Amino acid sequence: MSDTFTPASVLVTGGAGFIGSNFIHHFLAGNPGCRVVNLDILTYAGNLKNLTAVQDNPNYRFVRGDICDAPLVATLLDEERIDAVVHFAAESHVDRSITGPEIFVRTNVLGTQTLLEASRKHAEKVSNFRFLQVSTDEVYGSLGPVGYFTEETPLAPNSPYSASKAGADLLVRAYFETFRLPTLNTRCSNNYGPYHFPEKLIPLMIHNILQRHPLPVYGDGLNVRDWLHVKDHSAAIERVLKKGTPGEVFNIGGNNEWKNIDIVKLVCDLMDERLGRFPGESRQLITYVKDRPGHDRRYAIDASKLKRELGWEPSYTFERGIAETIDWYLANQGWVAEVASGAYREYYQAQYGNR
Ligand code: NAD
Ligand code: TYD
């Protein structure tokens, strides 16, 4: 473990998205002396409503802009005297990467390189600097029924999304090896929690159950994902930023594997209880649909390095986390209705209409 790094001014990219906005809430609450600048272009996945609770915090600033805009990034790093970049901004949805891979390469690969290059130049001007790349276990590819991804598992991404994240991770590595930019790289399993856009499995199922729409389960429903609450992910990122040794990779996971069909049934049952529907009612909406091409079978993370070296462990049980998440969606139906209007409807029709 290295000495504690205590940033005074952090640039968060993609802070209006699901994980970035949760991280900003978490970080501002725990670091009252630190400034947080949020650079986000506000794609379909970015939403300033995720940040209403912090928008008037004097330590917080939102800048609408593109991570590929090198002059803008350089100006922000200098004028805000940034000493840490926590990089969330990305195109993040596998299904969208199958229908339109190009934007994934632009945002995830070129955007990361633009940030790294600006950081390299800026780091020469500040006494201590960190660049933390927020990445995914999907860069490791797919597992069979046994075994776990460790930090030594070779990168073998299968979707355009994961390939673009792997490309970004390798650039982060290169900037450490070549330029000694003090980088850190986290790779986390599937997150769930508040502000999750309803294109991903859990919020999509919650949304469709509410609407009594079919619940599309890809293939045989037996693909396995490891699920971690977004607040535990946020705490892990903060720990790695402050305590991790530059140049290192840290896996983050919940030790919480679920087959997709089992998680869908669980969400159905918890929703039925809360909505006063009869037991098993929402399960009747489950509809098996055509599988995703190149669908990774199983993800499972060995996060023992993070526990051993930096003392991080998840604080949420899945039972508590999923119940709280469902309650959040039920209490925030206006948020869901708003993000699920307009362009979302077109996306949904294109993705699921003829499946
Ligand atoms: P998200 O899609 O909800 O949010 C992405 C954010 O990035 C949005 O606010 C969007 O407006 C912004 N953005 C996109 N392109 C941009 C650009 N060119 N310039 C500035 N901002 C831009 O994604 P998420 O689920 O919050 O994921 C955040 C990060 O965490 C991603 O890097 C993703 O790969 C990684 N990750 C996600 C998960 C998960 O389960 N969701 C798991 C592990 C890692
Ligand atoms: P997703 O939330 O898209 O995350 P990722 O593909 O990054 O793991 O999907 C999680 C799992 O759920 C994945 O195995 C695909 C499956 N899935 C469905 O079965 N139906 C759906 O409508 C969606 C969005 C996902």
Image (cartoon, grey):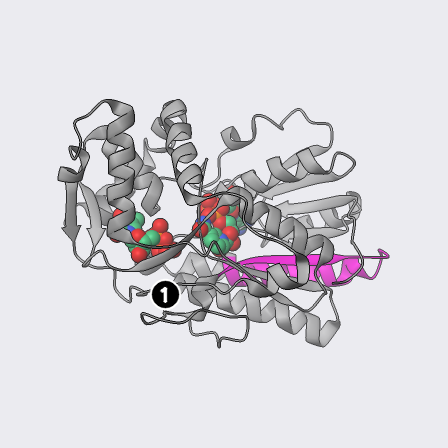
**Image coords of residue 84 (percent x, y):** 72, 52
Closer-to-camera residue (249/85): 249
How many other residues sit within 10 Å of disc 1, few (<14), some (14-19) or many (≥20)?
many
**Image coords of residue 349 (percent x, y):** 22, 42
Q: Quadrant of the N terminus?
A: bottom right
**Image coords of residue 251 (percent x, y):** 54, 62
Instruction: Work out whether residue 225 can be spotted.
Output: yes
| Mark 1 CB within 8 Å of ligand 2 | yes
Residue 185 relative to residue 215: left or right: right
Residue 283 relative to residue 245: left or right: left
- Whether residue 216 is in magenta: the answer is no
Whether residue 58 is situated above or below residue 322 in the rendered picture: above
**Image coords of residue 161 (percent x, y):** 41, 61
Q: Residue at x 36, y 26 (%)?
A: 330
Q: Which residue is mark 1?
A: 159
Per the rendered image, the range of residues in magenta is: 108-136
- Total labels drawn: 1
Tell me the amino acid under the disc marked 1. Ser
What secondary structure is marked by label 1?
A: loop
Closer-to-camera residue (320/140): 320
